[in-house]
Structures are given as C-alpha cells and as structure tokens.
Image (cartoon, rainbow, N blue to C red):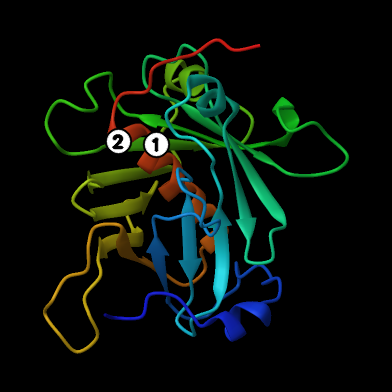
C-alpha cells in the first residue's frame, strides 16, 4: 500500500508552518479527506506538503448533525493553530459559506474580519454534474456585490466530485488545480479521498485550501439550512 502520510516519528517533529504568499515556486499538496483525529465518525482533512510534513488539518466530529454542521469548520495549520473559521450562511439559496480570520482582537463572525464569501454560481449547482463556484474577497457579501455588478475575485470550474477542478483569478489565469493522485511512478489512481492540489507561485496555500474545504461542503450534496441555538 502506498504511503499517504508520514511516520509517527515524523508527526512528532511537526512544527507550525509560516505563510507562503511569497513562495517563488509551484507547490503541490496531498489532500487526504480524513480527519487527523482517528476517532470513528470524524470527518475532515489532513494535508501534507511534498516533504511529507503535515501543513493543514480540519477536524470535524460530525458532518451529518445539522447543529454541528451549522457551526462551521476551522482550518488549522499542522500544529493545530487556528487559521480561518468557515461558516455556512444560514438560509442561503446558493450554499454560501463565509471565511473569517481567527484573531484575538475581533469576533469570529465579525464582518470586519471576513476574508471571503464563496457560493455556487447558481441555484442549479448540482444539476449538471459540473461544479461552478465564485469567490468574493473581503467583507462585502457575494449577493451585495452581484447586485452592484461586481466580478468575482475567483471562479472555480470543473467537477470536484471527480477531483478535476481549476481555480481561476478574475483575469482568468489558473492559480490552482485539483486532480486525482496517482501512485508514484505508476498510472494507478488512488481513491478519490486522496487528491493533489497544485498551487501556482505567489498564491497563498492557506487561502486555496480554504476554498477546497468549502467546495467540498457545497458540491457533495445540497446544503440544508439549519437553525440551531
């Protein structure tokens, strides 16, 4: 069986990884759709770089319980430090999610801390088998910017369910790709729970990974809004 993750000894040596916005070369991440918490019923992501180091993780204890789903997810670095809080927009017809910066000087859901909003580009997101989503950066919501005729900052096209997606910026340039992962030096594909995320130079892997997490949530099945206190 091919090794997806590093040995336990290597896990113990993991340290927080700094921001790579200024990375000068393309980076390839291996994304495993499995929580680093090995408890039964957990659902999340474990992400490794090309050296086998754990760089991102998402631990979620229940995907199906509506109250837990409505509370959102937290993207963490390899050491477990919170980076972004991802929350579904309640009663959104286009499965919108919002990302907030995890900082001590403002609330998780404060509009001034919003990093981006992401949603399906239409209410027929699940009809044709191809996923199309749009991302609006900053505190303005996607709906408000659409009403003003603003172009999305990023678009996602392709089929995430088939692990075949491209993330493009406003100019149409490909900034990242999602693809099925092959066994090294082979044509054998791994299961769709393991895939590659290739990020072009100059783009934040933290931001791109947040896009992938939200895309997984809105493309797997329709989001059913839940009102939980």
Res. 61 mark: none
Q: Furthest-right residue in view? A: 105
**Image-based side of 44 in relation to 192, left or right:** right
Q: Say which residue appears at 25% left-offset and 63% top-offset.
A: 179
**Which residue in the structure is indicated by mark 2?**
219
Tag 2–tag 1 contact (CB < 8 Å): yes
**From where the camera sits, is residue 214 visible?**
yes
Name the residue located 51 percent from the left edge and 28 percent from the top edge: 69
Q: Nearer the viewer, residue 163 or 114?
A: 163
Which residue shows up at 45% across the image and 28% down it?
Answer: 150
Residue 220 sits in which quadrant?
top left
Q: Quadrant of residue 194?
A: bottom left
Instruction: Return the residue at label 1.
Output: 217
Q: Position of residue 28 (x, y in %)?
A: 40, 74
Mark 2 crowdedness (10 Å alpha carbons): few <14, some 14-19, many ≥20: many
Of residues 139 and 67, the one drawn nearer to the viewer in this rendering: 67
Could you tell me how far apart the alpha carbons at marks 2 and 1 are, in whole angstroms?
Answer: 6 Å
- Horizontal side, residue 52 vs residue 12: left or right: left
Q: Position of residue 216 (x, y in %)?
A: 36, 42
């Amino acid at each position: 069986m091919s090794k997806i993750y590093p040995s336990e000894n290597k896990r113990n040596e993991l340290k927080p990884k700094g921001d790579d916005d200024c990375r000068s070369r393309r980076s390839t991440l291996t994304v495993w759709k499995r929580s680093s918490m090995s408890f039964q019923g957990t659902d999340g992501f474990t992400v490794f770089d090309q050296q086998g180091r754990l760089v991102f993780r998402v631990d979620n204890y229940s995907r199906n319980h509506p109250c837990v789903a409505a509370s959102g997810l937290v993207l963490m670095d390899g050491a477990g430090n919170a980076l972004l809080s991802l929350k579904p927009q309640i009663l959104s017809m286009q499965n919108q999610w919002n990302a907030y910066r995890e900082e001590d000087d403002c609330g998780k859901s404060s509009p001034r801390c919003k990093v981006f909003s992401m949603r399906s580009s239409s209410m027929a997101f699940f009809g044709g088998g191809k996923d199309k989503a749009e991302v609006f950066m900053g505190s303005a919501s996607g709906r408000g910017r659409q009403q003003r005729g603003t172009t999305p900052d990023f678009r996602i096209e392709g089929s995430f369910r088939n692990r075949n997606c491209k993330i493009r910026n406003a100019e149409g340039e490909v900034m990242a790709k999602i693809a099925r992962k092959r066994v090294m030096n082979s044509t054998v594909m791994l299961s769709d729970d393991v895939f590659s995320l290739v990020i072009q130079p100059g783009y934040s892997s933290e931001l791109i990974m947040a896009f992938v997490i939200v895309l997984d949530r809105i493309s797997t099945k329709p989001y059913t809004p839940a009102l939980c206190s």
